[in-house]
Image (cartoon, grey):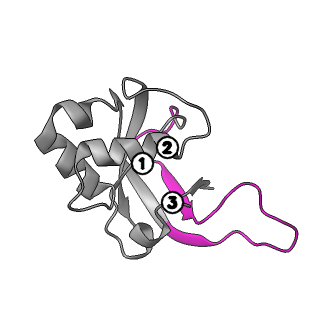
């Protein structure tokens, strides 16, 4: 049974299928070939709220990399920001947004899991 992965910040990108990569602090045990349910919100559901599944994702690649790679290599950063569902953004803009929305503070040098997927 697929695990549920929240896409609260990028719900629209999942709905319109413009997102094919996600970066996560966790999810280190995910491997290519796994499937996950993309959901709007997975934890902290209030009484009466139901899990909303957006799509079934097939994992094609999982690698570790520092967020700073998106800043130091401008072309890579812009390409990756587009894959994250933010076309027209620089890598630096994406990293700023990513860091701002994390519950714990860390720097751009933090290693994250880069997870690439296809829609099933």
Residue drawn at the location 51% of the way across and 35% of the way down: 25
- Dot in front, 3 or 1: 1
Q: Secondary structure at mark 1?
A: helix
- Neighbor class of circle 2 (other Cα within 10 Å; few <14, some 14-19, many 20+) is few
Report the Cα–Cα distance between label 2 and label 3: 12 Å
Q: Position of residue 90 (x, y in %)?
A: 22, 49
User: Residue 97 has which mark?
Assistant: 1
Residue placed farthest to the right in the image?
Answer: 47
User: Depth check: 38 or 86 in front?
Assistant: 86
Report the Cα–Cα distance between label 3 and label 1: 10 Å
User: Image quadrant for the N terminus?
Assistant: bottom right
Residue drawn at the location 79% of the way across and 72% of the way down: 49
Question: What secondary structure do most residues of the magenta stretch adopt?
Answer: loop
Which numbered disc, 3 or 1, marks the residue that appears first in the sequence? 3
Q: Secondary structure at mark 2?
A: helix
Per the rendered image, the range of residues in magenta is 28-55
Q: Is residue 48 magenta?
A: yes
Q: Which residue is mark 3?
A: 9
Q: Position of residue 14 (x, y in %)?
A: 43, 68
- Neighbor class of circle 1 (other Cα within 10 Å; few <14, some 14-19, many 20+) is few
Q: Which residue is mark 2?
A: 100
User: Image quadrant for the C terminus?
Assistant: bottom left
Q: Is residue 43 magenta?
A: yes
């Amino acid at each position: 049974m697929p695990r549920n992965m929240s896409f609260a910040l990028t719900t629209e990108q999942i709905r319109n299928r413009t997102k094919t990569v996600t970066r996560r602090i966790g999810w280190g045990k995910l491997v290519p070939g796994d499937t996950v349910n993309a959901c709007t919100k997975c934890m902290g559901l209030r009484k009466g709220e139901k899990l909303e599944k957006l799509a079934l994702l097939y994992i094609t690649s999982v690698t570790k990399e520092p967020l700073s790679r998106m800043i130091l290599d401008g072309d890579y950063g812009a390409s990756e920001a587009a894959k994250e569902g933010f076309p027209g953004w620089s890598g630096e803009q994406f990293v700023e947004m990513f860091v701002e929305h994390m519950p714990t503070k860390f720097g751009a040098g933090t290693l994250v899991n880069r997870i690439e997927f296809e829609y099933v």
